[in-house]
Amino acid sequence: MLMGGGSELSGLEIHGVRSRAFLRSPTVILAGILLLAMGLRLYHVGALPLGRHDWRQSDTAAVARNFYEHGYRFLQPEVDWGAMRRDSPPGPTAAGMEFPVYQFTTALLYGVFGVNVVWARILSVVGSLIGVFFFHRLVELQVDRRTANWSCLLYAILPLSIYYGRTIQPESWLIAASIAGIYCFARWVRSDRARFLVVSALCIALACLLKFALYLGLPLLYLTWTKYGARSLVQWRLWIYAVIVLVPCVAWYGYSGELAQKTGVGYGVVSQGLFTDWDLILTWEFYNKLFFRQLAERHFTWIGFVVLLVGIALPRREPGERLFDFWALGVLVYFFLAAKLIYIHEYYQMPLTAPACVFMGKVFARGWTNRRAVLLPTLIGIILFSGWRWWAYMLMERPGSSPHSRVAEVIAEHTNPVDPVITASARPIWLYLSHRKGWREPRDGITAERIQSRVENGARYLVGRRESFSAARWRMLEEAFAAYTVVYDDGDIFLLRLTPDGQ
């Protein structure tokens, strides 16, 4: 009996050892991180493009829908609105923009499954998960597996990494292509296998087409230097690599810039370009907003930001760790080159997340065994603050929390699909949600003369919200508005017919 009991106990012990070994296996840990990342990003996956940066999301969704409705013309990505010029016709208008492969792929899914923004969000989630996978491979290659696990866990749960990993934007594709490109280049440096170099060139080219990702040059140059040193400039394979990356970018951005000049519609790097805004970067407000109110408070959480600073100060144990120093430095240089874009749009700051997570991951990887009493509550704090920030962003996506949904309902209810509409808002969200075309006018741009010029170009309705105007501004506009027919007015939202019935 004793021997039998001992055998049974031994069997249980063996089973427990095997179970623990299974749960600690690299494949299971990475799969768990990917499942966690996927679950967080799939929440509310069918949400309309409301909330943070609804203007960018609705424009992206509009381009995809217009591809689907107007014949999949890849070289003519169309937004729902016309140019700001006085003589411009209503949208849809071909716009100069970054490479619209994300929107085009979304449109292809629309052709199979029907128009629903869930497919755009799923594409973003897939891109985010691909980024997590290659991020783990890269950190494991350059540092170690333990750091890779921690870095990817943090990357999976940070609030804006979650949010922009499921918005209707190409950001997750940009990050995934960037990480995959750097990983394949690092593999080529170690193995000298041509296939890694080719795949890296294609990934980096895609990243630079999706956004003008100049910051990728510095980590790639560092890896090149570790392989060839001063002989880097005479390596013919690297010149071919540069051609593969740069030729498509020069061709597309040149074409896109010409398209923006022709139609008067362009955005992102195409319309604003890369530039150093000295008037901005020499102000305290630039640094306060970028590093404290955005990076520390939103991207990494305040607790995570402290961990990041500690990680930056840690000594480098492996030569490969230097890659992430140069990567982060490249992104910071980019922040100053595109200061205005970075200052206004927080999603342009997303490229810093990956290298920053490595610095944070090293803190946990090196200290978890001996300093768990400090690091466990630190991790819990990061999770709680991330959850709070993430939930605040999620609440903004609810139609009941957004006045844009009600405005769009009014437009859709009281106008015909072919009626061009002027929106007294610079945001294109009203046109997208109501499935209408027209013009988006900043509230300061609404004047009697501007309305009349739009009427001459086909405008039939003007929609707006009283709260968008100051009391003095509203009194000035009431006289101009009196010339038109009030179709709807609930005290805030108003809709005016600008032409007589039947015209």
Image (cartoon, rainbow, N blue to C red):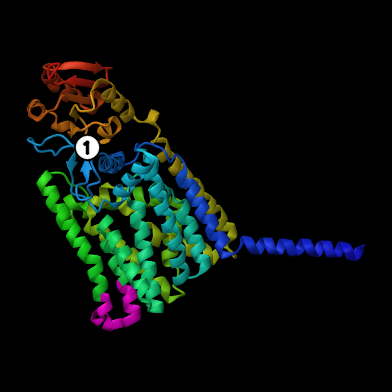
In what quadrant of the picture does the N terminus appear? bottom right
Count the marks. 1
Residue 335 in view, yes or no: yes
Q: Quadrant of the C terminus?
A: top left
Q: Position of residue 427 (x, y in %)?
A: 24, 36
The residue most toward the bottom is 231
What residue is rendered at 33% in x and 46% in y? 108
Q: Which residue is mark 1?
A: 80
Decide: few, some or many residues near mark 1? Use Cα within 10 Å; few <14, some 14-19, many ≥20.
Answer: many
> Which residue lies at the image location 17% right of the left edge and 60% below the top edge?
251
Q: Is residue 182 above or below residue 481?
A: below
Q: Please tell me which residue lies in front, 275 or 280.
A: 275
- Which stretch is magenta? 221-238
Q: Residue at x 30, y 32 (%)?
A: 433
Kind of residue at badge 1? Asp
SS label for mark 1? loop
